[in-house]
Amino acid sequence: MGSPQGIEVPAALVASYTRNGGEGERAWIARLPALVADLLDRWELERDGGLASGEASLVVPVRRTDGTRAALKLQMPREETTAALIGLRAWNGDGIVRLLDHDPPNGASLLERLDDSRTLASVGDDDVALTTLAGLMARLHSVPAPEGLRGLGDVARDMLASVPAAVAALPDPEDRQRLQRWASAVAELVGEPGDRMLHWDLHYGNVLAAEREPWLAIDPEPLVGDPGFDLWPALDTGWERLHATGDAPRVVRRRFDLLTEALGLDRRRAAVWTLARLLQNTLWDIEDRRTAIDPSQTVVAEALPRH
């Protein structure tokens, strides 16, 4: 998809929005080239490299009038897009990419430029990588949560309400029992959801090398809740390489120990809120018509300390 300004939206992003999207998604992706051109003009930006995209966003490398390098990111305005802007404003670059400007109605943000060619996954020593991630996570959790973000209590209650139908969709009795156990554990803590601002998706791929600091987090999906709910992406990160070690449970246990110690978390609560993430992932899988719990979820659950 092109435009008179020469802005070519990657085909994969177009497909992502049009394959399963509705009229709103198709309309937004159709006007994306014009929107990029308008923002380049309005914010006085000069393109500085080829376009990149993820499943839901377009990223345009740019330079500002003072010569500083930045990244123009656009994503269809949704609840999670708004939450990301709220979180980035509150964090103000503390352990995370800095928000330089934003246009919430259009789902646009101007971010400091990081090195997207080097993620934390490039660090060979897993303990070093995880300790780095834990340090960033601790800083993110230390910032008071602003108004306007979803709370973990509501998320957890919605999950628990979906469990009976999900259990019925699993043909394996062991999977059904496992899902019920996870739900029972979560139900015990649903009334104590926590009050920290969580990243919700902090894994090695969402930590990039930077100039301002060695490493900074990107792509938050902010939520207010217990820090234990933030651990699963780090426990599961680099699953293929982790599985290839032949002892994935040992690595997961090591990661859990490092994270809970670095963050000063109660291990039992952290284990239960991690089960909540496994429950959430499985519910999403069942919505996508899968009929079994993913083996990686089971490995993580069995590696956790008994709750």
Image (cartoon, rainbow, N blue to C red):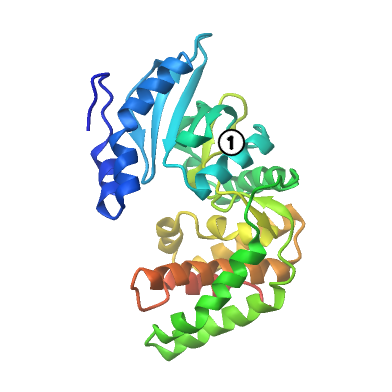
Residue at which label 1 appears:
216
Q: Is residue 275 visible?
A: no
Residue 87 on image: x %, y % = 63, 42
* Residue at x-position 42% and y-position 39%: 75
Residue 283 or residue 32, whichever sits in front: 32
Seen in the image, is 237 located left or right of residue 229? left
Instruction: Work out which residue is located at the far bottom of the displayed protein and give it.
Output: 173
Q: Nearer the viewer, residue 137 or 253?
A: 137
Q: Which quadrant is the N terminus positioned in?
A: top left
Question: How far across and down, in percent of the image, does residue 47 sit?
Answer: 38, 17
Residue drawn 31% across and 41% down? 27
Relative to 221, residue 229 above or below:
below
Q: Secondary structure at mark 1?
A: strand
Where on the picture, by quarter, is residue 165? bottom left
Say which residue appears at 33% left-offset and 32% top-offset: 32
Most extreme residue toward the top is 66
Q: Position of residue 136 (x, y in %)?
A: 65, 43
Residue 306 drawn above or below residue 270: below
| 235 is higher (above) or lower (below) than 94 | below
**Based on the displayed image, in which of its 4 quarters is residue 193 positioned?**
bottom right
Graded by Cα atoms within 10 Å as few (under 14), some (14 to 19) or many (20 or more), the crowding at tag 1 reads: many
Residue 195 appears left or right of 182: right
